[in-house]
Amino acid sequence: MPKFLYVAKNYDGEVRTGELVAKDEQGIAQQLKADGFLVTSVREMEDDDGKVRVAFMDRFTKIALKDKMMFARNLSVMISSGLTVSKSIRNLADQTKNKKFSQILLAIYEDIKAGKNLSDGMAKYPSVFSELFVNMVKIGETGGNLDETLTIVSVQLEKEHALLSKVRGALMYPAVIMVAMTGVAILMLTYVLPQMTGVFKDMDVELPKSTQFIIAMSDLFKEHSVIVLIAMIVFVIFLRLAMKTKAGKKAISFISLKLPAINNIVIKTNCARFSRIYSSLLKSGVTSLDALKIVANTLSNYYYKKALRDSIKQLQKGIDLSKVIGENEKIFPVLVKQMIEVGEQTGETEAILIKMAEFYEDEVNQVTKNISSIVEPVLMLFMGIAVGFFAIAMLQPMYGLMDNIK
């Protein structure tokens, strides 16, 4: 039998949208009437294997996490206040200051007017609305509690935004120092050193290897500055593209889990995100297998993705999640296994996961506060070595010349 997309309303003004299978449109109307709803729009779906077609350019559209967070929160409030989904989307499209996001919301609004679900419209923009976001909306549409699921999504996005802000804030200081050091080094090699190296070339002494290296670098930057600049830009572009490949993501994930100052943040951040997202999905009525699939696609670290995808196969064999998590002790601390195990035994997995998420979020907050005290001496040591190397390379020929004079 064919599948139909419908929009219906009851006598209290509640709007329901979704998909139903029936012989014809009259069958859809009868099914909804039995639930106390009157059909306002119904359309037969084309047989496309349930796949949502995504335009090529829409795959690369990016919207700030803060904008999506406010969207989920405001949409939940509007729907719970009695506004229809379509009118709420239209209002948000008019209110948002982000023109690109406004255009996306207007396109979704047109899809809803045509009888499609909100989740189907959002699924056309995978780079804007994550699989977690789309699935949570679909769950809300099916269960008739869209405002509640949107509240859960908004809380999740708020926590994620806070978590990322803390991590980025902690890494900002060392990043700025490294960029400043690179800029000063290029300035020295291009403008300052050429004036000093001219003196060395007139000396009748054999220059040390360190001095020869610095002179060669200076000549390269001075005589081929355009080529060097182009090469640096090409290298950065190549690096960004390489990081998006499977091998690149795996390498970055491996390095981030091995770096002493970074691995602690990576593990705690991923554990916090896993706990909160998995708990939110279970709370919304998603099965544990489907929830793990969504979480695996949501986390960015390759090894966490792999661990969760492997756990799905183990769960299908009847093995408890706590045991599977325990086998990945390098990325999941023992506490995660123990907490999940308690949840499985008591039937309070959702509540325990939320507590664990809050615990790791607090841990990340504490680590990021202390990160500057860890990174600062390392940077100072690195700067001291660089300055010392430069000073020795410049002064050593001078001492050699003075010895020859004696």
Image (cartoon, rainbow, N blue to C red):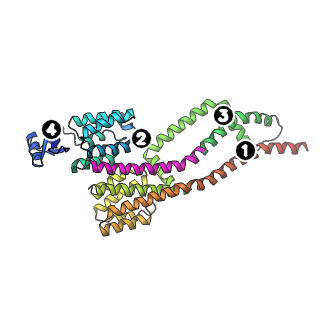
Residue 390 got which mark? 1
> Around disc 4, counting alpha carbons within 10 Å, would you say few (fewer than 14), some (14 to 19), or many (20 or more)?
some
* Disc 2 versus disc 1: nearer the observer: 2
Q: Residue at x 57, y 45 (%)?
A: 175
Q: Nearer the viewer, mark 3 or mark 4?
A: 4
Residue 40, label in figure: 4
User: Which kind of residue does numbered mark 3 sit on?
Assistant: Phe
Amino acid type at image mark 4: Thr
Lateral position of residue 393 relative to residue 85, left or right = right
* Chain part drawn in magenta: 147-176
Q: Residue at x 45, y 55 (%)?
A: 269
Q: Earlier in the sequence, mark 3 or mark 4?
A: 4
Q: Is residue 177 visible?
A: yes
Badge 3 is on which residue? 221
- Is residue 224 rendered to the left or right of residue 363? right
From mark 4 to mark 1, how far is it between C-alphas? 77 Å
The answer to which of marks 2 and 4 sits earlier in the sequence is: 4
Residue corresponding to mark 2: 64
Tag 1 or tag 4, which sits nearer the N-term? 4
In three-dimensional space, the C-alpha distance between marks 2 and 3, rounded to whole angstroms, equals 38 Å
What type of secondary structure mainly makes up the magenta span? helix
